[in-house]
Amino acid sequence: MGNRADEYGTDVEIYRRALTSTIHADTPTGAPEQLLDLLDRLGFKRREARTVGPVYIWHEVPAHLDSAEQQRLASRAVPTLLLAGYTVNCTPDVFDETAYQQAVHEIRSGTSRQATRPSGTAAPARRHASTRRIP
């Protein structure tokens, strides 16, 4: 079972799964619970597949939302994840620039509806490399 976050070395990879309309948010194998919880609070639905070996965990945008709303939810999550210290990549076919900019504006003005990290908890230091640019 492939995992884009493991493959690309990011904390979160947001993309549309091939041959489906499902938007996934992959996290690395063994991702910290606080990252998984943050994705939950941002509106993603946690999924898991148990195997004899590892337990695979990923998140999906809720299927009941229409395509445009799914893209907005995914794009609005990016600034909150970045602010929490995570490295994020969102593919161009999912990314909604307007929704992203609106979320950034709300964070800067203090009116964000996005989930925030509880005070006193910092994101784990994973890498010193710069975050890849989101389209």
Image (cartoon, rainbow, N blue to C red):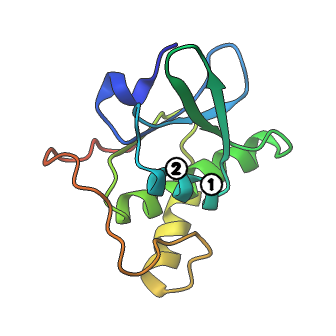
Q: Is residue 95 above or below residue 97?
A: above
Q: What residue appears at the point 41 percent right and 31 percent down from the top-left corner? A: 29
The residue most toward the front is: 52
Label placed on residue 103: none
The reply to whether residue 98 is in sight is no
The residue most toward the bottom is: 110
Q: Which residue is mark 2?
A: 36
- Alpha-carbon distance for marks 2 and 1? 6 Å
Considering depth in this image, is 46 or 112 the residue closer to the camera?
46
Q: What residue appears at the point 70 percent right and 29 percent down from the top-left corner? A: 22
Residue 54: where, in percent of width, then height?
49, 22
The reply to whether residue 40 is in sight is yes
SS category of the residue bearing label 1: helix
Tell me if 13 is positioned left or right of 9 in this view. Answer: right
Q: Is residue 66 above or below residue 16?
A: below
Considering depth in this image, is 125 or 103 the residue closer to the camera?
125
Tell me if 8 is positioned left or right of 32 in this view. Answer: left
Residue 85: where, in percent of width, then height?
31, 59
Q: What residue appears at the point 13 percent right and 48 percent down from the top-left corner? A: 128
Amino acid type for the residue under numbered disc 2: Leu
The residue most toward the right is: 64
Q: Which residue is mark 1?
A: 40
Tell me if 15 is positioned left or right of 6 in this view. Answer: right
Contact check, label 2 and label 1, Cβ < 8 Å = yes
Considering depth in this image, is 122 or 103 the residue closer to the camera?
122
How many numbered markers are drawn? 2
Amino acid type for the residue under numbered disc 1: Asp
Q: Quadrant of the C terminus?
A: top left
Query: How many residues crowd mark 1 within 10 Å: few (<14), some (14–19), many (20+)?
Result: some
Residue 60: where, in percent of width, then height?
66, 38
SS category of the residue bearing label 2: helix
